Image: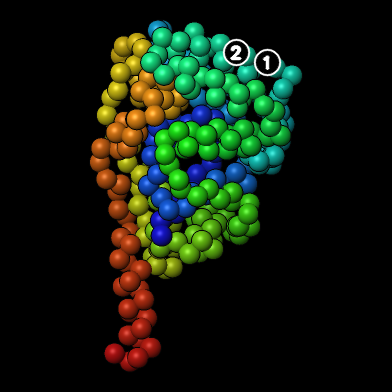
Amino acid sequence: MTVGIIQSSYIPWKGYFDFIDDVDVFVMYDDVQYSKNTWRNRNKIKTALGTTWLTVPVKYNSLSKIISETEIDYNQDWQSKHLRLIKENYYKSDFFEQIYDEFSELILNKYNNISQLNVALIKWIMNKLGINTPLVMSAELNPMGSKTERVIDILKKLKATEYLSGPSAENYLDYKMFEEVGIGLNYKSYIYKEYPQQNSPFEGEVTILDLLLNIGLNSREFFKSKISNKIIIPHSYQVKIISAMSGLTTGA
């Protein structure tokens, strides 16, 4: 069983949903420290003048605050601004009415924290894309340890045989720990086919709303990577570990 673990993001780009679609269980890693100026509370849309940010204001005043405890600042009317920017830049798109009204209804609700908003939107988008991967909140698993040790603990509790990671984790994951527990390790690939957008040139690193508004629900060919994920530690490695341990036990 392949498990993926990523922090929630505000209306993520298509690669985020490709990642979820590639795993058997997806863990929303929101019991870790919130970081300012990241994808947790913002994303980009395409305009005639390039890209622009949609940012959800949050009440952030402590380095120890975790994502699932980071409150949204509803003293600012950010929802109206986001809806206005989307409408101004996508009202001519083929699937505007089909997507915009439902998105509006979701973000006009009030959420206790940025994690709740993100998860609600991610689940809605998954439904639109036909992705049925089960979602688990990391806090439900009470993960122990730090860095790679904490990831391994989550994987063991879910009985994972493989871990799919984003390529940026290459700088901090301890490969030896995966080898020791016999869990395979792959890195996600993010190479995508271009699709028709409202303005040229093409911009791929924007919220998946851009894809849904322009292409609609039949957009699977555009959110699945054109190349396979990078295998670091093969899944078969676990079988070798078990076989070796069995051989030692039987004296073979």
Between residue 45 and residue 170, name the one nearer to us. 45
Quadrant into which the N terminus falls: bottom left
Q: How many marks?
A: 2
Residue 79 location, x and y as percent?
A: 63, 18
Q: Which of 192/182 is in front? A: 192
Q: Going by the image, does 32 lie left or right of 187?
A: right
Q: Are marks 2 and 1 in contact (CB under 8 Å)?
A: yes
Label number found at residue 68 = none
Which x, y percent locates residue 138?
A: 59, 51
Distance CA(mark 2)–CA(mark 1) = 7 Å
Amino acid bearing label 2: Lys
Give the labeled residue for mark 2. Answer: 81
Q: Find residue 96 and report its image quarter.
A: top left
Q: Secondary structure at mark 1?
A: loop
Query: Residue 33's spot in the image, x, y percent?
Result: 62, 42
Q: Is residue 68 above or below residue 52?
A: below
The three-letter amino acid code for the residue at tag 1 is Asp
Residue for point 33% across, 59% down: 233
Near mark 2 (Cα within 10 A), the count class, few <14, some 14-19 or many ≥20, is few
Please tell me which residue is depicted at 33% across the width and 79% down the height of the picture.
244
Q: Which mark is residue 77?
A: 1
